[in-house]
Image (tube, rainbow, N blue to C red):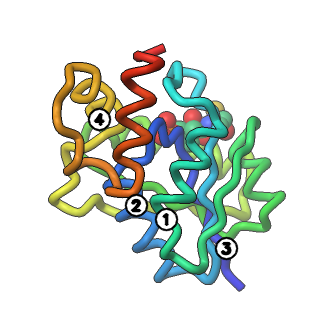
Amino acid sequence: MATAVCPGSFDPVTLGHVDIVRRASKMFDHVVVAVMTNPEKRPSFTAEERVALLKIALRDIPNVEIDCFNGLLADYTRVKNAAAIVKGLRAVSDFEYEFQMALTNKKLNPDVETVFLTTSAEYMYLSSSIVKQVASFGGDISGFVARETLQQIKERLCKGGAR
Ligand code: PNS
């Protein structure tokens, strides 16, 4: 059984993330979507909130598990016995950072391959930061996040602001 890990900050999960996970779920037997720590980012949502939103946004995909891990991705792929790390690649600007991460993870765990899925054209511009910025100015984010998560994300961003 081939397992893939889809890691990310998911702060919060966008339709772009949902698209990548859905496509990964057709390529692998089991997909673990892991909320992880990006030391370069200061999240607006707690890890528990991000997990809860992912569970809602991805609930119609049967072979997906949502988890949370505060450590190295390479170590986590070992724990999960994963064959691959799946990441979405948006544009040239993503490439350098993702390439560096992929090579680092390969060095730390030679048994895992990083697989890049090119983002669907309709989500090329989309990111969690865009969602947070539009929401913080009272803009409409309904085209950016799963319908079932819209209210929760809006309320949370209004209540907590961008922490
Ligand atoms: O959605 P993001 O912020 O681009 O995801 C980045 C993430 C969380 C996958 C990355 O920062 C990560 O792998 N964090 C865990 C720590 C780690 O293993 N870093 C890579 C080696 S330095």
Badge 1 is on which residue? 58
Asked if residue 143 lies left or right of residue 104, the reply is left
Q: Earlier in the sequence, mark 1 or mark 2?
A: 2
Query: In the figure, 95 relative to 114: above or below?
Result: above
Query: In front: 68, or 124?
Result: 68
Cβ at disc 3 under 8 Å from ligand 1: no
Inter-mark Cα distance, 1 to 4: 18 Å
Front residue of 24 and 136: 136
Q: Residues within 10 Å of mark 4 (few under 14, many from 20)?
A: many
Q: Is mark 2 within 8 Å of ligand 1?
A: no
Q: Are marks 1 and 2 in contact (CB under 8 Å)?
A: yes
Q: CA distance from mark 1 to mark 2?
A: 7 Å
User: Exactly how many numbered labels are in the figure?
Assistant: 4
Question: Which amino acid, by three-letter code, is at mark 2?
Answer: Val
Q: Residue at x 47, y 36 (%)?
A: 11
Q: What kind of element bears circle 4?
A: helix
Between discs 1 and 4, the one toward the N terminus? 1
Residue 3's mark? Answer: 3
Q: Is ligand 1 within 8 Å of the beta carbon of the residue shown at mark 4?
A: no
Give the residue number, with chain letter if any, for mark 2.
Answer: 18
Select label 4 or label 3 by which is in front.
4
- Which picture quadrant has residue 130? top left
Q: Position of residue 65 (x, y in %)?
A: 66, 66
Give the side of residue 83 with respect to residue 132, left or right.
right
| Mark identifier at residue 134 | none
Q: Secondary structure at mark 3?
A: strand
| Residue type marked 3 | Thr
Image coordinates of residue 76 in percent, x first then y, are 76, 51
Image quadrant occupied by the N terminus: bottom right
Q: CA distance from mark 3 to mark 2?
A: 18 Å
